[in-house]
Image (cartoon, helix red, strand yellow):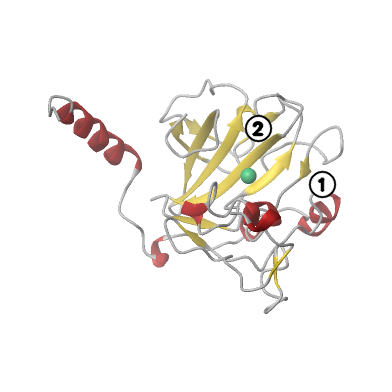
């Protein structure tokens, strides 16, 4: 095998590492949840505006794709999905600085990452088009940072925003609920997924409410390889 291409590739890898992957941060360096952020959409929720869709954590959807899609996220849905028509303005959940536009952190076709105080970062995924913001731009809570899109690129099959709250080293993913001031009880009732959590019938109360979901660490072991899952994986497949 020729080594001609290794040098440029390793340079590229280094530049990505320098730009996006800082050493893992200790818990003490990360702001604790105090409802310090807002919602990523303006106005009231509703069938013609936006609704909470899939929750964070141990969802049935994540369970079905625990290896294929979420294998690097311990099998869990590491963010919140908000259903919204394509083109709905997406807003920064807090004051911060644009850290990435279409960076390497998933949720295609387009995404934005904003760094906030307390070593927290928010990711806005499945955006309709590339954000016009530039890396380094300061934003205020509520500023429009892009337009919501569709993970399946149709704007009729799965139009939604995927929102994550991470530590700034992008190694850990937090349940956004205690960080975002909102009426989560009402939003959870109105959303299209219902409760939507996967049961382990040998521990049926575990991770069954929106605010009792575990933290996710990148590359950790699957948390939902349950002894007695319900609903079972379709056809026993993974
Ligand atoms: Zn999602």
Per the rendering, the mark at residue 90 is 2
Quarter of the figure that contains the N terminus: top left
Rendering quadrant holding ligand 1: top right
Asked if one can make out residue 144 in the rendered structure from this viewpoint, the answer is: no
Q: Secondary structure at mark 2?
A: strand
- Image point (13%, 24%), residue name: 4
Pinpoint residue 231: horizontal percent, then vertical percent: 74, 62
In the displayed structure, would residue 219 be above or below residue 2? below
Q: Left of 121 or right of it: where is 46?
A: right
Quarter of the figure that contains the C terminus: bottom right
Q: Quadrant of residue 86?
A: top right
User: Could you tell me how many numbered marks the image carries?
Assistant: 2
Nearer the observer: mark 1 or 2; the answer is 1
Asked if one can make out residue 137 in the rendered structure from this viewpoint, the answer is: yes
Q: Depth check: give the residue in front, 233 or 14.
A: 233
- Image point (30%, 54%), residue name: 23
Q: CA distance from mark 1 to mark 2?
A: 20 Å
Name the residue tied to disc 1.
192
Pinpoint residue 49: horizontal percent, then vertical percent: 81, 34
Per the rendering, the mark at residue 55 is none
Q: Quadrant of residue 131?
A: top right
Mark with earlier residue (1, 2) = 2
**Mark 1 Cα-neighbour bin, 10 Å: few <14, some 14–19, many ≥20:** some
- Image point (62%, 59%), residue name: 57
Q: Left of 27 or right of it: where is 214?
A: right
């Amino acid at each position: 095998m020729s080594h001609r291409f290794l040098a440029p590739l390793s340079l590229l890898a280094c530049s990505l590492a320098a730009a996006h992957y800082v050493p893992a941060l200790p818990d003490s360096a990360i702001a604790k949840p105090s409802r310090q952020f807002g919602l990523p959409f303006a106005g009231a929720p509703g069938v013609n505006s936006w609704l909470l869709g899939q929750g964070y954590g141990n969802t049935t959807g994540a369970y079905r794709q625990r290896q294929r899609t979420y294998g690097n996220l311990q099998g869990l849905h590491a963010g919140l999905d908000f259903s919204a028509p394509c083109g709905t303005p997406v807003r920064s959940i807090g004051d911060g600085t644009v850290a990435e536009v279409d960076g390497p952190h998933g949720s295609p076709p387009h995404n934005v990452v904003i760094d906030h105080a307390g070593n927290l970062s928010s990711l806005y995924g499945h955006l309709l088009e590339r954000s016009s913001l530039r890396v380094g731009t300061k934003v205020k809570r509520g500023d429009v940072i892009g337009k919501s899109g569709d993970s399946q690129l149709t704007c009729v099959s799965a139009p939604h925003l995927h929102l994550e709250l991470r530590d700034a080293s992008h190694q850990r993913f937090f349940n956004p609920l205690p960080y975002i001031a909102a009426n989560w009880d009402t939003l959870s009732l109105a959303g299209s997924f219902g409760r939507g959590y996967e049961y382990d019938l040998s521990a049926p109360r575990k991770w069954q409410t929106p605010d009792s979901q575990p933290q996710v660490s990148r590359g950790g072991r699957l948390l939902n390889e349950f002894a007695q899952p319900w609903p079972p994986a379709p056809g026993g497949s993974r």
